[in-house]
Amino acid sequence: MRSTIITAALAQAATAAIQPRNFIYIIPDGMAPASQTLARAYEAMVDGEATPQQPLIGAIPIDQLPVGNVRSHSANNLVTDSAAAGTALAAGFKTNNGMIGITPAEEPVGTVLEAAKMAGMKTGLVVTSTINHATPAAFSAHTINRNGLAFISEQQVGYSHPLNQSVDVLLGGGACYFKPSSDPDSCREDDIDLIRHAELSGYYVTQDRQSFTALQQGQNISLPYLGLFSSDSDLAYEIDRQQQPEADREPSLTEMTELALQALTRETTCTGLNCTATPGYFIMIEASRIDHSSHAHDGAAHLHDVLEYNRVVDLVKSWIDEHPDTVMMSVADHETGGLTLPSRWDPRPLAGANHSVDYLQSAMEAYTGDSAADYAADLAQAYGISNADSAALAQSESFAQDLADLLNAQSGLAWSTGGHTGVDVTLYAYAAGEMRDELVRDLAGSHDNVELPRLVEKYLKLDMDKVTRRLREDVSWLQ
């Protein structure tokens, strides 16, 4: 089943001595090098003393970690979507845009997460999108159409997975896809109650900040664990999340990552005199909303979600230093928006924004008072814009885009598309000690995205092809 590309990649890695117990796979959806340039300059100019005329811009922690570049085209397009790219990063196969965990011939292919689960490892998915969105779906489900969100949710908790598998840690948004149609908050068209199924299957289920906090960063939990922190949507942009009331604030990606790592480690650590060593864990973490902010050309929201991704990478790097049997690899599935930083760009105006344009548009649409222009001016101020034509904004049919355009004009950010692009994305990696040297040697250079999960498979001594054979024994379940 292995392509020539995959065989060649494995031959190059044949001398690798990496044998970690645990693997952390981080995907900053939609991010390319310009995003890190923006974050680096912002921190130097807003938190430091640099200016555009004196750009004394030093390195940020993630600058220690790039090891190569990754090509991202799909089977049927030079510009991939997240479904095809996720399938490549999870299963090592090219597929058509829109397809999840299957080949263009509609044959299911096993993923590295499923192979880890089959090998007895614990598994996790932590995202800021809905938990059944394209990237987490590509690691845990198989469907012809990425929009089959209800079917994807069923597979993730083991209700309809063809191998009766379920993911041990699921953290993100999209609770409505787990509730039966009789529930007023449901997104389903049937009466399947996946929350109830999960609870009966042993999942600890949480849907709010209070119950998340009660778990004390993973110390008070036994797996499996299902945490769904928004009903019918993705989690909030980081810039909006920071403004939420503290008692009700959604968990950040960093908080969810720390909890997941603590819980997975507790479940896979051998303690006591008579204990037996257990397999480790595999976790995929996605900074999902970087992509969404790029689609919206929202420079402020984009910046804050990139900064949050960097905090997650810093956390994971420190975690690996304390748990040297663990390896991290991070790569975007594709770039979104075509972000460029032309002459005279300046990130400082972004510091005035406190909300995303999506949030502010929702606020504008909900306004029922008789001073729309004044309210539009207040919302513009919340986006760091003090000189807007508030009357025109109040009457605009594209309020969010108009706000984004105004701030882009002030900061000098430029976007070439509202969709994805085909540019290469940066590959980051980290391990401790001698294992890091081997990891860097394996990953240095330019890679096709299908090579990466096969390397993870090799490091963890998994068998994705075994999963594929099992999936194809009977494909009547596929839809």
Image (spheres, grey):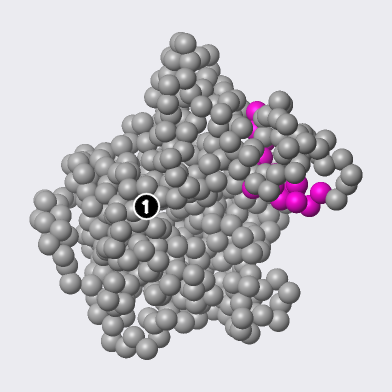
Determine which quarter of the picture holds residue 165. bottom left
- Farthest-out residue, top: 54
Is residue 302 visible in the rendered structure shown here? yes
- Farthest-out residue, right: 370
Residue carrying label 1: 333
Q: Residue at position x 71%, y 35% from top?
A: 380
Magenta stretch containing residue 174, yes or no?
no
The percent position of residue 441, horizontal first and vertical second, equals: 18, 42
- Type of amino acid under label 1: Asp
Q: Main secondary structure of the magenta part?
A: helix
The percent position of residue 453, horizontal first and vertical second, equals: 28, 58
Vertical comparison of 44 with 184: above or below: above
Q: Which residues are magenta?
A: 352-367
Instruction: State which quarter of the image contains the N terminus.
Output: bottom left
Observer-nearest of 395 and 6: 395
Instruction: State which quarter of the image contains the C terminus.
Output: bottom left
Is residue 90 visible in the rendered structure shown here? no
Q: Residue at position x 22%, y 56% from top?
A: 451
Q: Residue at position x 34%, y 53% from top?
A: 79
Magenta stretch containing residue 358, yes or no?
yes
